[in-house]
Image (cartoon, rainbow, N blue to C red):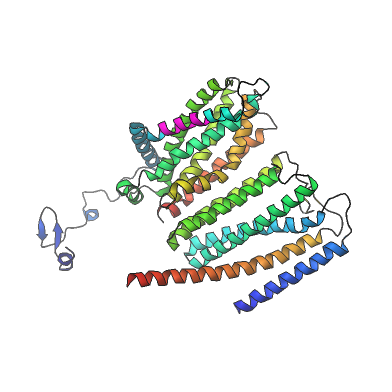
Amino acid sequence: MAKAERGGAGFSLQGGLQPTPQPMPALNPQLPAEPHSPSFFRQALTIAAKDLRSELRTKEALNASLAFSVVIFLLFSFAFDPGNLDIDINEFSGGLLWLAFAFAGALSLNRSFARELQNDCLDALVASPAPPGALFLGKALANFALILAVEIISLGVFAVMYNVHIQPQLGWLIVVMLMTTWAITVIGTAFSALTVNLRMRELMLPILTYPFLIPPLMAAILLTTDLLGGKPISADNMIWVRVLVAFDVIFSLLAVVFIDIVLVG
Amino acid sequence: MREKITYVLAIAGIALVTWNLYKIFFVLPPEANVAAYQIVYFHVPAAITAFTGFFVALIASGLYLATGDLKFDAFAAGITEVAVAFASVNLATGMIWARYAWGIWWAWDARLTSMLTCWLMYAGYLILRRAVDEPTQRAKLSAFLSIFGCVNVAFVYKSIEWFRTQHPAPVLSVRQGGGMGPGMEAPIYWNYLAMLCIATVLVIVRMRQEGVSREIDSLRRMAHAY
């Protein structure tokens, strides 16, 4: 085939050897000069929809992380005596919840890019016209939805099993959950892309992710403990809301801007 | 030339440390109320040296991404390793002091926790470098991690001031609310300079080693290709 091209004749599957090379499509006046390309966010949403669709069809990461978080709640019950009335569960419920959420979240984050390795799908995604930032954002949005779904179900299970009242500050609790989950998602998805081609992928992701997540997890644990204890957000714990907001904004921007270093390589 | 700079810096570092040790133990007045306060002259400069290293590693990583020159990657790797070593010195001296002053080796105070977090983040960086074989990929992935890490250091460090803490107030007068007795602070800065000299020597040695190992790697690849 290469020989035929050098000789000046094109080769196509339909026509075999052809005497003259085909004109390039862009020169054809009937075609628009610039093909219409969808916007950045539309591309991100397309990738998110694709990921969610394939996850909802198999439900492998969803079921696994849900089961995992219930297992963690079960194990916590052996760390202390939940029936002991002297122990106020509200004092450390935030820590229990967010440890379970962070561990369960890592399961789906590990799968996020690894599932694209089969059939070289990751190469196809990177080679597609979608910019790396949109690819990252799409993956992150899908992970966000999945982790949040697991968290909401787990929160219900936790409230029932440990007799914790989530209603009094439910609004703020949801806000804190949304912001912290996005922090976990951004760092986790970026590092999932970072580790996807490494030998010890499953090992490297938690080693890198958890130390990075300490500021948002610290904020979430403090805030959730306050909120589950019935204490509203006021001047003294507002600073941790700000930590969460700043972390989310700064790392989202950094990840979208710099992710091409990792993905395109 | 490079050899000479290395030797000069090493000698300067050792001389400075010796002179500082003399000043700390024989010239400065012994303070009765602060137990084993002399260790602070190594504890604080080690922390500043570590943070300087993390910051320089960020710049080196940025330069690598801008130029694609693996020399900057070797520099970033070397300086991160040295910075992690100084962070370990900071943690170790802090623990020794805590055992003496507080009676416990470790307190889950915000500043201790944040230093440990930084240490773990950069230990992750070093582990990542070992997990990637291909030099260009290794350089790119670690540059990305270095950028994220340095931004997170700011987060971790800032959170100190918002967390209730039992760590002594900042000892340097450049920070608000800090300050030691008159004439007590200078050895901290001199020790910082000494540690910078030693750190630079270590980085130069490490960079040379990194360059040699890359050369060996490429020779090995060539040998396999034939």
Q: Whole-percent x and y of residue B176? A: 77, 48
Would residue A148 appear left or right of A117 to someone viewing this image? Answer: right
Magenta region's main secondary structure?
helix
Residue A65 in the magenta stretch? The answer is yes
Q: Is residue B79 left or right of residue B46?
A: left
Residue for point 59% across, 70% down? B205
Left or right: residue A88 versus residue B209 is right
Residue lying at 64% horizontally and 78% vertically, measured from the top left: B4
The region drawn magenta spans A62-73
- Quick check: can you spot residue B174? yes
A113 is higher (above) or lower (below) than A5: above
Residue A178 rendering spot, x and y as whole percentages: 52, 32
Q: For the C terminus of chain A, give its image quadrant.
A: bottom left
In the image, residue A71 above or below residue A130: above
The percent position of residue B137, horizontal first and vertical second, equals: 43, 59
Name the one closer to the observer, A176 or A113: A113
Q: Quadrant of the N terminus of chain A?
A: bottom left
Picture quarter containing residue A43? top left
Residue A42 x, y percent position in the rendering: 38, 39
Specify whether residue A179 is in view: no
Residue at 46 percent of width and 34 percent of height: A147
Q: Is residue A19 highlighted in magenta?
A: no
